[in-house]
Image: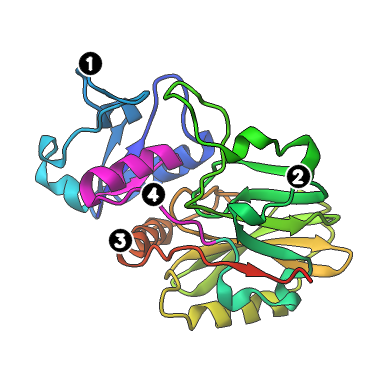
Amino acid sequence: MFFILQKEDRFNFDDIQFAIMESLLKSFKHQHEYVLMQESDLCSEDDSFNGLERRLKDSSEFPDEYQKAIAIGEVSFVGKVLKIFHGIDNENAIEVPPCLREYRYLKRKYSIVPVWDIPREGRYFIKDATQQKVFSYKGELENFVYDEMFEPRTNEYDLSLRFDYEHLYQISEVVNVLAEYRAYILEGQLETVSHFSGDAYLLPDMELLKDAIRTYNKQPDCPKSYSIDLMITPEGTAITEVHNFMCLGLYNVNWDEKLLFAFRDGWNYVLNYNTPQTEYSNFE
């Protein structure tokens, strides 16, 4: 396989993840190839601009093997590679997939709604559920949501946060999170569960996790490799969200070559499915 690994001069997209991936690629250099690139390497060097962003290069400006490359890096870096070589504008977020939107997995009020259903007040968690890592907020919505966020930008230099009427948004109940874990599923099998926040003495419900994996694996668009974020609340273990293996934080440092194939699986999911977000609500 051939990988494009992001490496910036001033900072790495994730120092730990970069070190893990480069170490693996060096260890298996006879089986895989890779190049290091900066985000600026994907953009034109001329003075042509599209709004405030530099123009992306055309795929013809790269060697032929880049057409089959798997990109690893920040969301914006990976998104540029997808756009240049595959014409894909962005990776759709999975959030909690429809087959797992049951109260036994959610254990909270949870919804994915269009802009016009976003409440103006109340204590909630809110995030963009269509596009990866746009924003998130937890707290009183009257301290966050304001009228201008529902209006279009008046000029290209307006960088304020605005809601996108083509996107869906997750609105969920704020719960008391006691501990958080990430489960890594490679080739449909649980590889490891890593603690990343809260009380490490509180362990997740493994039977619920097994059941969630079995249920999701049966879906035709389920990625071969993915992660499930879990939170432990006073109500028990709940699923926070599911991530495709693309721009995925690694909370475990013990990996082997299977991790490279997991990123391949994530890449293939976006190329073949990239399932759009769907509306849902268990609010009464």
Q: Quadrant of the C terminus?
A: bottom right
The residue indicated by pointer 4 is 90
Measure how far apart labels 2 and 1 are at the Cα level.
40 Å
Q: Are marks 4 and 1 in contact (CB under 8 Å)?
A: no
Q: Is residue 163 magenta?
A: no
Residue 129 locus on image (x, y percent): 56, 54
Residue 271's disc number: 3
What x and y, as percent, mark residue 58?
16, 37
Q: Which residue carries the number 1 mark?
A: 47
Q: Position of residue 217 (x, y in %)?
A: 50, 79
Q: Secondary structure at mark 3?
A: helix
Identify residue for label 2.
138
Question: Separation of disc 3 and disc 4 at Cα?
Answer: 11 Å
Type of residue at label 2? Lys
Contact between labelled residues 3 and 2, with CB atoms less than 8 Å apart: no
User: Mark 1 or mark 3, which is nearer the start of the sequence?
Assistant: 1
> Which-is-in-front pick, marks 2 and 3?
2
Tag 3 and tag 1, C-beta contact below 8 Å: no
Name which of mark 4 and mark 1 comes first in the sequence: 1
